Structure formats: C-alpha cells, structure tokens
Amino acid sequence: MKLRAFWRKPASAEPLAAPPPRRLDPVWIEAPLTMLSWFLPGGAVVVGALGQFMLALVLLMVAFGVWLRLWRSRKKRRAMGQAMGRTPR
C-alpha cells in the first residue's frame, strides 16, 4: 500500500453535477461550413489550394495598399507644387 493513499480525500457520496447544456453554434457559422463540406472533398490538396488562394488575396491587398499610398503621396506632392506656383508635369 502506498503512503499517499492516507492523504487522499475520501470520495464524496454525492453524484456528480450534470454539465450545463451545450450551446449550439449560430446558424450563420454552421451553414457555410456544412455547405463547404458537401461540395469540397476533404483532402490536403484542397486545403493547400485554399491556402494559396488566401495568400494571393492577402498579397493583392498589400500591393493595393502600397499602390494607394504611393498614389496619394504623389497627388499630395503635385498639389503642393501647384500651390507654390510650379507647373505640373
């Protein structure tokens, strides 16, 4: 017999409390996932293709942000040049 058995708390005679009822996910989350699971095969190729597509979207957004920033700064420089009396190019 192990010594630590003497320090254990005795098991309570009360039954364990029932866990609270599980809340279901909202339909707006569950429905698209269910439809995707019907139409898409569940394989690593599909996951990889979706990952590539998402990466392309992220890179496109970054490139658009850089282009927009450059365009706005060019517009601002052009407006400042006109305010100083220079002719625009």
Image (cartoon, helix red, strand yellow):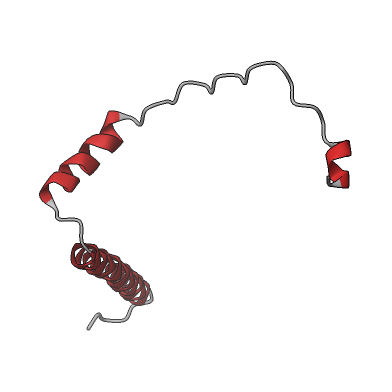
The answer to whether residue 1 is left or right of residue 31 is right
Could you say which quadrant of the image residue 49 lies in? bottom left
**The furthest residue to the front:** 1
Q: Judge by depth and name the residue closer to the eye, 2 or 20.
A: 2
The answer to whether residue 20 is left or right of residue 40 is right
Q: Judge by depth and name the residue closer to the eye, 84 or 51.
A: 51
Could you say which quadrant of the image residue 33 lies in? top left
Height in image: 66 above or below 37? below
- What number of labels is visible? 0
Height in image: 81 above or below 15? below
Q: Judge by depth and name the residue closer to the eye, 7 or 79.
A: 7
Query: x%, y% of residue 46?
Result: 19, 63
Q: Residue at x 18, y 47 (%)?
A: 37
Query: x%, y% of residue 43?
Result: 20, 61
**The furthest residue to the top:** 14
Could you say which quadrant of the image residue 78 lies in? bottom left
Q: Residue at x 38, y 76 (%)?
A: 84
Query: x%, y% of residue 70?
Result: 32, 75
Q: Quadrant of the N terminus?
A: top right
